[in-house]
Amino acid sequence: MCRNIKTLHNFDPPAREDEVQAAALQYVRKVSGSNKPSKANEEVFMRAVDEIAHITSHLLQDLVTAAPPRDREAEAAKARARAEKRFGAAA
């Protein structure tokens, strides 16, 4: 769906509120087809972002797993390595 939405479940430390909000914003942008809503749609757009962030927070709190929590730094390093392989080294 949207490559900018990152996995937020099973990390140590857990996902922060700003990460959940950013994922919700990306989702609403993708679904609405609008990066920045018009003034007429701004209230509905932001309400959707807030509601999706709220539900996402509940989802993350309620999910259970037997897997050990993932390390944020290790996952970020893996993502950088994948990006370097795909796009080449940054100049």
Image (cartoon, rainbow, N blue to C red):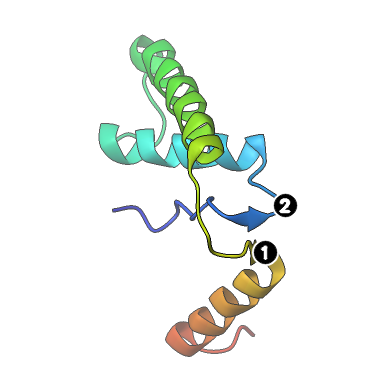
Name which residue lies at 50% across and 79% down: 83
- Residue matched to label 1: 72
Residue denoted by label 2: 13
> What residue do we see at 63% from left, 61% from top?
69
Q: At which x and y percent is residue 6?
A: 49, 55
Determine the secondary structure under disc 1.
helix
- Between 50 and 89, the residue placed more toward the observer is 50
Q: Is residue 7 left or right of residue 78?
A: left
Question: Do the CB atoms of the residues marked 2 and 1 lie less than 8 Å apart?
Answer: yes
- Say which element carries label 2: loop
Q: Gap in Å between the C-alphas at discs 2 and 1? A: 8 Å
Which badge, 2 or 1, comes first in the chain's sequence?
2
Relative depth, front residue between 48 and 37: 48
Along the line of sight, the residue nearer the viewer: 40 or 7: 7
Figure disc tally: 2
Mark 1: few, some, or many residues within 10 Å (few <14, many ≥20)? some
Callout in the foreground (2, 1):
2
For residue 43, the mark is none
Residue drawn at point x = 45 percent, y = 54 percent: 4
* Residue 36 spot, x, y in % from top left: 41, 30
For residue 91, above or below residue 31: below
Q: Amino acid at mark 2?
A: Pro
Amino acid carrying mark 1 in the image: Arg
Residue 58: x percent and y percent?
A: 51, 30
